[in-house]
Image: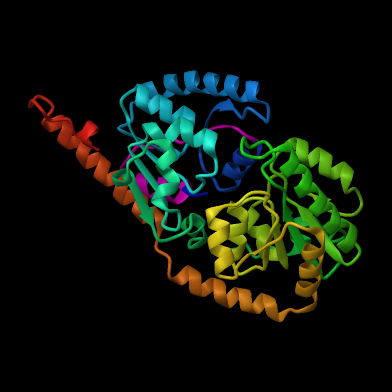
Amino acid sequence: MFFKPAVNELEKSGHEVLSTSRNYRECNQLAKIKNLNLTIVGKHGGDLKYQKLRQSAHRTYLLAEIVNKFNPCISVSYSSPEATRVAFGLGIRKISLNDSPHSYSVNKLSIPLTNYLLCPWIIPYKAWSPFGIHRNQIIRYKALDPVAWLRSYRSEGYTRKDLFGKNKLLKEWTILIRPTESAASYISTKNIQSNLSLMDSIVSTFHRTSNIIFLCRYQDQVVDFSNRYRGRAIVSKETMDGLELISICDVFVGGGGTMSAEAALMGKPVISIAPISFYINDYLKRLNLIWQVSDKSTLLKLLTKLQENSQMQITQQRLAKKVMDKMEDPIKILLDTINIVINKAMDRKIHARKPGRDSFRRM
């Protein structure tokens, strides 16, 4: 989502761009929806440590072959250990984007080898200190990442019936639920069970009065939730445009960060049931754009209040617009950084034979 507008701008400027991704259910299908041409390299390692390690090593090998042939001057990605290792090994300058200092394992493997780290301004410099990057290498933008694609987003105007058929969404009120990222290294089994208990309470209490939609992250979640909530909720079998789903819902319940931020900035009432703390969610909570809950009683009372008071939705929309209007464009910051790195690379080539000149190390 973030890189689509950036790729478009780079190609318009005459740059040759290679876009890669691992074989990952949501990413592959969303790329087709957004018409983003991807080269698929390796696959997601799942939730087991051995498989994560094995697939990461395999993907690093495959990616090295492809990147070596393409011979880019810059590598840009979220904090991918594989992309970072390949860039470092081939002497390619690396720009990483990251709004998740809580993802300790991924950050530990990628940030120390990153030349520039771009992140939202609300994340303090000290949050990155454990990962061995100097403050001078961190570029912060006054925006949350979803602003990069929300500003250009234009709804297709789908209705609930368009997306799910005439007979499935018969009730007037719709709850969209995004489960937690259960395969992430920073999510424990205890976190998953706690999150599941909260979702159970929503379905049990509201399935008679509300349309309940689950947008799952993984295929195993699709299977498990389809069986668990059969006849009481809709579990999307295919990856769908999350923004279109947010646009048709009345309230969003999120177990993670990105879609919760999207929904909040789109002016939807958002309840976060994320089992751990995120800087982004904490910021949106301070602005009253997100409610954070961790117990069933509070969750159900809040949902009931939202269902009965339509004025709260109008308030959220007005507040979200004010917040969005004050934020800058992260894509512009990324493109400016890319241009800086390109200019330094050209300067390095021009002065390559002069002693003591090594702009790569001086970054």
Counting from the top left corner in percent of width and height, residue 334 is at: 36, 49
* Type of colouring: rainbow
Q: Residue furthest left?
A: 354
Task: Note whether residue 243 is visible.
Answer: yes
Residue 156 in magenta?
A: no
Q: Is residue 22 magenta?
A: yes
Residue at (71% x, 60% y) in the render? 293
* 57 lies above or below 169: above
Looking at the image, residue 166 sits to the left or right of residue 359; the answer is right
**Residue 45's image quarter?**
top right
Location of the C terminus by quadrant is top left
Q: Position of residue 353 (x, y in %)?
A: 9, 24
Q: How many marks?
A: 0
Q: Residue at x 12, y 30 (%)?
A: 357
Residue 91 appears at what percent x and percent y? Answer: 30, 25
**Res. 249 in view:** no
Q: Is residue 245 left or right of residue 139?
A: right
Vertical relation: 10 (above or below) 288: above
Instruction: Decide: is 244 above or below 34.
Output: below
Vertical order, 212 against 139 (above or below): below
Which residues lie in the magenta part? 3-24
Q: Quadrant of residue 358?
A: top left
Q: Residue at x 48, y 36 (%)?
A: 107
Instruction: Tell me residue 341's x, y (percent).
Output: 26, 41
Corner quadrant of residue 76: top left
Nearer to the camera, 23 or 107: 107
The answer to whether 347 appears left or right of 297 in the picture is left
Q: Is residue 130 left or right of residue 351?
A: right
